[in-house]
Amino acid sequence: MTRRPTEPPLIVVEGSGDDFDAAVAEVRSAGWQVVPGFAEAPVTAGEVRAGAVDTASDAAAALLAVLGGAGTVIHARTDGDVLDRLVDDLRHVRRVDLRRAGPRPVEPLRPAAVDPDALAILAILAEGRTLGDAAATLGLSRRTADRRLAEAREALGAERTVEAVARARRLGLLV
């Protein structure tokens, strides 16, 4: 028998109900107790909450479950803005396993679509400095800098920050 990881999983599934069910089955097979929904009941050790997020209040309940110590398997069925905020908030707690049904369609980049602050953040990160440094340098809160960075990744069609920096450099957006 394999030992389950000590840290409960934090999975966000953008896809069909089958994709969500497969993620729940995977978590169960790893030895975690899966509890449906994001109820406000106290979290017990080894518990993973699983359910759909359709609204901002569902997202808040899922976040509260994570902050209470639960692992989660979230079936993301909400609009992109609510989902982006939820994933950003969850990433402040710990690593998120974001699963998409297929490759995200990448629209052609319109350099004007990348916010100047976001480009400045990417430039600072490209120097090897931290996001906190970038926020302080630009006079932004850490949360605003994180949101702008997420917007830059989205505009550049990048999943990771390193990829966003590389794409911005290739496109001549970073000096």
Image (tube, rainbow, N blue to C red):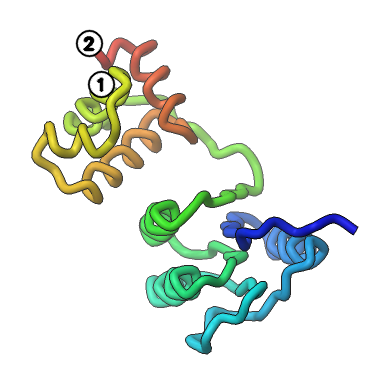
Quarter the C terminus occupies: top left
The amino acid type found where label 1 is placed reads Ala
In the picture shown, does residue 97 fall above or below 157?
below
Residue, disc 2: 175
Is residue 143 rendered to the left or right of residue 28?
left
| In the image, farthest residue toward the bottom | 41
Mark 1 neighbour class, 10 Å CA radius: few under 14, some 14 to 19, many 20 or more: some
Which residue occupies 12% across, 32% down? 137
Lower position in the chain sequence, tag 2 or tag 1:
1
Mark 2 neighbour class, 10 Å CA radius: few under 14, some 14 to 19, many 20 or more: few
The kind of secondary structure element at disc 1 is: helix
In the picture shown, does residue 46 fall above or below 166?
below
Q: Quadrant of residue 173?
A: top left
Residue, disc 1: 123
Which residue occupies 49% across, 32% down? 106
Expressed as whole percent of the image width and height from the top left, the position of residue 97 reads 59, 50
| In the image, farthest residue toward the left | 139
Q: Nearer the viewer, residue 162 or 136?
A: 136
The amino acid type found where label 2 is placed reads Val
CA separation, marks 2 and 1? 8 Å
Q: Which of 30 and 118 is in front in this view?
A: 30
Question: Residue 47: which numbered mark, if any?
Answer: none
Is residue 165 rendered to the left or right of residue 136?
right
The kind of secondary structure element at disc 2 is: loop
Which residue occupies 41% across, 60% down? 86
